[in-house]
Amino acid sequence: MPGERLCTALRITASTLFALSVLVAITCTYVKGYQFGYTENYHLSFGLYGAFLTLHLFIQSLFAFLEHRRARKENRPLKFTKSVALCIAAYQEDPDYLRKCLASVKHIAYPNLKVVMVIDGNQEEDMYMMEIFNELMGVENSGSYIWQSNYHQEGPGETEFTQSQGKSRVEQIVRQSAFSCIMQLWGGKREVMYTAFAALEDSVDYIQVCDSDTVLDPACTAEMVRVLDADPSVGAVGGDVQILNQHDSWISFLSSVRYWMAFNVERACQSYFGCVQCISGPLGLYRNSLLRLFLHDWYSQHFLGSKCSFGDDRHLTNRVLNLGFKTKFTGRSRCLTETPSGYLRWLNQQTRWSKSYFREWLYSALCFHKHHPWMTYEAVVSGFFPFFLTGTVLQLFYRGRLWNILLFLLAVQGVGVLKAALACLLRGSAHMLFLSLYSLLYMSSLLPAKLFALLTINRPGWGTSGRRRLVLNLVGLLPVSVWFAVLAGGLAYTVYRESQQPLPDTERPFLIAGSAIYACYWLLLLALYLAIVAKPCGRKQELPDLSLLQA
């Protein structure tokens, strides 16, 4: 109707102007560099841009706290009237992780939960996953099928008729069996998820997603169902995803503290406004009625002429948001998932995630007008932050003085310490102190990986190899190597330039004191890390009791 179209046009205009206003305001504070306070010769200062970032962190933490408090007060009894199917995507999974995943699935406290596991691959080398499924779920309760094709590709020797027959058989098994396992022609994770969603059709009310390296808490399904049952305007909900193998290495440990911050602060804050921007693949629940509306469009997503093969969870979330439905986070639904413990595999994973982030950022902008202004504000802040940071680093390393570079490094770690202190208060765990170490990992590796991801955004692939057979991929080292070469060149140029003139007397004390503080900071953190964390790191950890997830 004309009135409705006018309202939509006004909302689009308002959200666009708001996004531009936020971007212009941030750019002006960054470029102008207004200082609230400073010492003589500007050796120390506190500017408007720094004040903005600090305020953003406190506001984000405040709304995250309010969301957690609101969730704790929610105690209405569950009626268990909604049917739920749990869909597990598996690809060359480590047998140990798969066993842990399926063992946890058997302990989920939700009546008549349907379980569908689809394996991406139908070769002899993939058979072990179906065998583990039948062993743990019980052959008598399970339906299994090895499909030579998939929904969109005919396998070797297959015809359109035999492909159709296989599809009918898959759908019959999935709908009639409490537990079903399907092996199909390799097609990527999105193909696997499509098979599960399409085969279920409208036979259940809610569909839960899970990865095959994830250990689920017994109450995870019930707690997410509670959120969807309580509010019909919520289309999807995600849970608290933490790290299963956090003690495998320093990378997996730092990922564990970063995960806690990402879910319990950043996504909890987004949830307060009903606009969580990514329902994570290891633990999410969707209204099946909504999936039916966009399943084909989600599967056939293209970007710049290429079919999208990653970012499945982000695009699912964006599709829900684009329909005008809210997306939520609940910390009462929990799981543990595997993360790369090697630097190269972690770097490739982060590059893949960054590609999908930038691509889906553009898509999410199409529905800014349908949701709370916080979605627009946070998308602008987080989306442009890497570019402001890159500009700052390059300017300091090539046009600044040694003291400017050192002060920047101190500021980076200072912000890291501030975030770590807030996380310690919110979580009540001293382990969150090590969140400040993640700042160095971000600056040295994740930042160049984001820039590289933007340049290679159309390159397809899973990004990380299967966990049973790890493949060495050195491509991720390219942006990091270039980044270090650029910074080394800037630092060498700055040292040469300052060696041509004497160091100002007013600057020498700051340089000495700053160097001492920076060195002491790292010595202290390293000592604490070796004393508290490093002992268990590097040793294979036993699976924690599932009841501990409730703590």
Image (tube, rainbow, N blue to C red):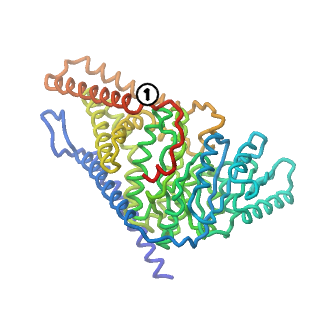
Q: Tell me if 78 is positioned left or right of 508 in this view.
A: right
Q: Which quadrant would residue 19 be assigned to in this image?
A: bottom left
Q: Report the residue at 85% width, 52% height from top.
A: 158
- In this view, 334 is above or below 534: below
Q: Which residue is mark 1?
A: 484
Q: Position of residue 453 (x, y in %)?
A: 52, 42
At horizontal 44% and vertical 46% (from top left) the residue drawn is 259
User: Closer to the camera, 152 or 121?
Assistant: 121
From what the image shows, is residue 187 above or below residue 179?
above
Q: At x 23% / y 25%, what residue is drawn? A: 516
Task: Residue at 37%, 32% (x, y): give it.
Answer: 532
Q: Is residue 373 above or below residue 357?
A: below
Q: Secondary structure at mark 1?
A: helix
Q: Quadrant of residue 411?
A: top left
> Left or right: 29 with respect to 147?
left
Foreground residue among 287 and 496: 287
Q: Is residue 532 above or below residue 113?
A: above
> Which x, y percent locates residue 511?
21, 25
The answer, for residue 351, to whether it is visible in the render is no
